[in-house]
Image (spheres, rainbow, N blue to C red):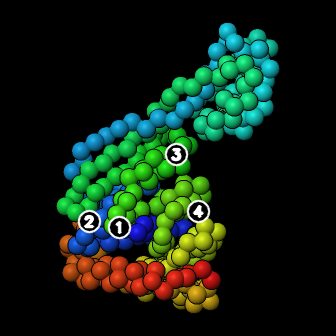
Amino acid sequence: MIICVASGKGGTGKTTIATNLAAALEEPVHFLDCDVEEPNAHLFLRPEMSDRLDFAVEVPQIDLNKCTLCGKCQEICQFNAVAILPETALTFPELCHSCGGCFLVCPEDAVVSTRRVVGQVETGRRGMITFAHGRLRVGEAMAPPLIRRLKQEVSPHGLTIIDAPPGTSCPVVTALWGADFVLLVTEPTPFGLNDLELAVGAARELKLPCALVINRADLGDRRVQEYAARENLPVLLEIPFDREAAAAYAQGKLLVEALPRWRQWMTALHDSMIEALRGRPTGHG
Ligand code: SF4
Ligand code: SF4
């Protein structure tokens, strides 16, 4: 089973839920931190890293001995990564999104492939948790391919927990793709609700069952709960604001280790997700 923990925006406690859920379960778990622009699950899970591999994408280089400057590669490139000038051809690898279009259209076989490192994948272990995260180089726009690479680490057996990037754009959709269940972590504020609606839309577009965890549930209004009821979205857990938890979080502690009630909440949350999956369809509206 693949559970993807997502949120419409950052700062809702998504990583707190994902890491504590993984740490609370007494079973083998694959944990993938797909927030490749700002991975931070390792700060809480503290896995012992065993491998670090460069992640490279394919970018074009133009063989000027073969190129006739016909311009077809420039025409197809949506990212202005190729410029055909009257006397030469230029490529801008940092703009390239590795779509492969220019390779396909070149009639002269003049576009050759080179590799450009855009990030790293690190893997490790903490007890029964097999851990992997990706780290995109600053300023790179290649989060989806790195997330796809990370998802090769999904467990073929047992449970995989994916910590998705925040937001609702391409990287999030890449993280959600192929999940069995989406757990959306939100907070009861107007911004939280707006971003939650977008995240629910993305999960439904992919036809994925989803449910909510409402963090700091006692601090805002009831509009998230009302929205959930209207949209037939199960609320699996409401967590009140908790000063002790905030202090433990600030020290990089796992809450399931610092506060016993968190272990109970996380195991109950896991059981609720299993039940919700058995009672499919969930949260399809
Ligand atoms: S691979 Fe795609 S994005 Fe990159 S230069 Fe070629 S057409 Fe443009
Ligand atoms: S499509 Fe091929 S031949 Fe035409 S300009 Fe591009 S590299 Fe040169």
**Relative to 53, residue 153 above or below:** below
Question: Which residue bears the numbered disc 3?
Answer: 145
Kindly state the secondary structure of the residue where label 1 is placed.
strand
Nearer to the camera, 152 or 33:
152
The disc, 4 or 3, on the residue closer to the chain's N-terminal end is 3
The residue positioned 51% from the left and 35% from the top of the image is: 57
- Number of marks drawn: 4
Question: Which residue bears the numbered disc 2?
Answer: 28
Q: Amino acid at mark 2?
A: Pro
Q: Amino acid at mark 3?
A: Pro
Discs 3/2, front: 2
Quarter of the rendering containing residue 189: bottom right
Question: Which residue bears the numbered disc 1?
Answer: 159
Mark drawn on residue 168: 4
Q: CA distance from mark 2 to mark 1?
A: 7 Å
Q: CA distance from mark 4 to mark 3?
A: 16 Å
The disc, 3 or 2, on the residue closer to the chain's N-terminal end is 2
Q: Position of residue 230 (x, y in %)?
A: 62, 89
Q: Are marks 4 and 3 in contact (CB under 8 Å)?
A: no
Mark drawn on residue 55: none
Q: Are marks 2 and 1 in contact (CB under 8 Å)?
A: yes
The disc, 1 or 3, on the residue closer to the chain's N-terminal end is 3
Would you say residue 247 is visible in this rendering? Answer: no
The disc, 2 or 1, on the residue closer to the chain's N-terminal end is 2
Kindly state the secondary structure of the residue where label 2 is placed.
loop
